[in-house]
């Protein structure tokens, strides 16, 4: 196919000075072809521009979707991370409380053992006192028997 410049050059150069009907028709045909080519080029340019705009818009939208997806995923991960930190702090606090309760329990056990030992000693003392009382009574009875005889 001829370039638009050649078609324009042909339209301008006319070998004969007489304008015939075939020349007018060929000139009209050439100008129509020129218009068609120009229209085609213009529509191709507009289509390229539209395609480029659509491509940029699609890339922008895809980037936005990607950012939103990353935010959604990171939001959950961030929340899990914050919860994990809170749990770790609570675990440390619980360990401290457990240690304190363990010390207190040991103290209570020591106190109850001391009380049990004291009660045993009191019981042992009562037994000793009863044994002493019986011994004193038997000695008193023996002395009383000796004294009466």
Image (cartoon, grey):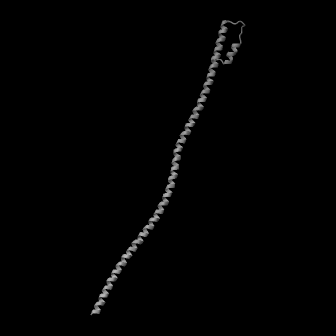
Question: Is residue 41 rendered to the left or right of residue 136?
Answer: right
Q: Residue furthest bottom?
A: 149
Q: Residue at x 59, y 34 (%)?
A: 60
Quadrant position of residue 11? top right
- Residue at horizontal 29 percent and vertical 89 percent from the top: 142
Q: Is residue 84 left or right of residue 17?
A: left
The vertical placement of 78 against 55, above or below, is below
Q: In which quarter of the image is the N terminus?
A: top right
Counting labels gives 0
Name, please, the residue furthest toward the left: 149
Examine the rendered structure and indicate whether residue 143 appears above or below residue 70. Answer: below
Q: Where is residue 100 in the image (x, y as percent from the top left)?
A: 48, 63
Work out whether residue 96 or residue 136 is closer to the camera in this orientation and state it: 136
Expressed as whole percent of the image width and height from the top left, the position of residue 144 reads 29, 90
**Quarter occupied by residue 18:** top right
Front-lying residue, 99 or 123: 123
- Residue 130 horizontal/vertical position (percent): 33, 80
Quadrant of the image for the C terminus?
A: bottom left
Q: Which one is in front, 101 or 22?
A: 101
């Amino acid at each position: 196919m001829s370039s638009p410049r050649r078609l324009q050059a042909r339209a301008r150069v006319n070998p004969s000075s007489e304008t015939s009907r075939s020349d007018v028709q060929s000139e009209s045909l050439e100008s129509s072809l020129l218009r068609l080519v120009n229209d085609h080029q213009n529509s191709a340019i507009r289509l390229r521009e539209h395609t480029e705009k659509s491509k940029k818009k699609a890339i922008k939208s895809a980037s936005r979707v990607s950012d939103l997806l990353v935010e959604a995923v990171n939001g959950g991960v961030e929340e899990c991370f914050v919860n994990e930190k809170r749990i770790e702090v609570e675990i440390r606090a619980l360990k401290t409380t457990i240690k304190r309760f363990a010390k207190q329990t040991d103290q209570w056990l020591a106190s109850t053992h001391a009380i049990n030992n004291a009660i045993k000693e009191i019981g042992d003392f009562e037994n000793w006192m009863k044994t002493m009382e019986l011994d004193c009574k038997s000695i008193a009875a023996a002395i009383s028997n000796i004294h009466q005889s």
